[in-house]
Amino acid sequence: MAEFAAVVLAGGRARRLGGVDKLLLPIGGRTLLDRTLDAVAAADPLVVVGPPRTTARPVRWTAEDPPSGGPLAGLQAGLAQLPLETRVVAVLAGDHPHLTPATITRLLDALRAVPEAAGAVLSDPGERLQWLVGVWRAGALREAMPADVRNRPLRAVLAPLAPLTVRAVEAEASDVDTPEDLRRAHGTSE
């Protein structure tokens, strides 16, 4: 069993990008989804919540219930795919072009250093917590899940867990939601 599992949220409609499947957009020769999956290549299992797509590495696909129920429903669906003995899980949105395995290692190291912490999340340069770039103790996430996750804000469930904060290095906290984000991602890709 690997040190950690991963749940990558890959649903959403990408309305601000005209409805295109943004996770298949290429940045530096790799899709946004593959770049995110590369960051958690050491995870086992590696679960992706969303419509199945072609990926460069094998993943376990699942869907949120209810469909289009939001990130919290996606997280719940992903957690349901993990073995009960899973201790730590990386939780990521699939649209982070600059995450690396080193990002995940820093988050894991922070969590390891504070055994009583429920999780560790990345903060952007403005010190805003990036709720979909973090590692968590799986038991804490399972306990925090409300009975009804439909359209509930992820932050409202995760914030009370008081995660540790790990500062982003360079552009690793950036995601792609708008055409401008996509242009920036192309400008800073490897």
Image (cartoon, rainbow, N blue to C red):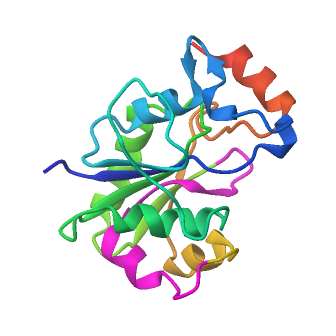
Above or below for 122 versus 176: below
Comparing 158 with 145, the one in front is: 145
Q: Which range of residues does the magenta coloring cover?
A: 124-149
Q: Which x, y percent locates residue 29?
A: 56, 11
Q: Which x, y percent locates residue 81?
A: 33, 62
Residue 126 is inside the magenta segment:
yes
Is 125 placed left or right of 102 in the picture? right
Q: Quadrant of residue 119?
A: bottom left
On-image quarter of the C terminus? top right
Q: Which x, y percent locates residue 153?
A: 68, 73
Residue 153 is inside the magenta segment:
no
Q: Residue at x 57, y 29 (%)?
A: 98
Q: Quadrant of residue 72?
A: bottom right
Above or below for 180 versus 81: above
Residue sticking out furthest to the bottom: 147
Q: Which x, y percent locates residue 172?
A: 58, 35
Q: Residue at x 49, y 40 (%)?
A: 52
Q: Quadrant of residue 113?
A: bottom left
Is 33 placed left or right of 83 in the picture? right
Q: Residue at x 62, y 38 (%)?
A: 95
Comparing 163 with 66, the one in front is: 66
How many numbered marks, from 0 up? 0
Comparing 162 with 18, the one in front is: 18
Q: Residue at x 52, y 88 (%)?
A: 147
Comparing 115 with 61, the one in front is: 61
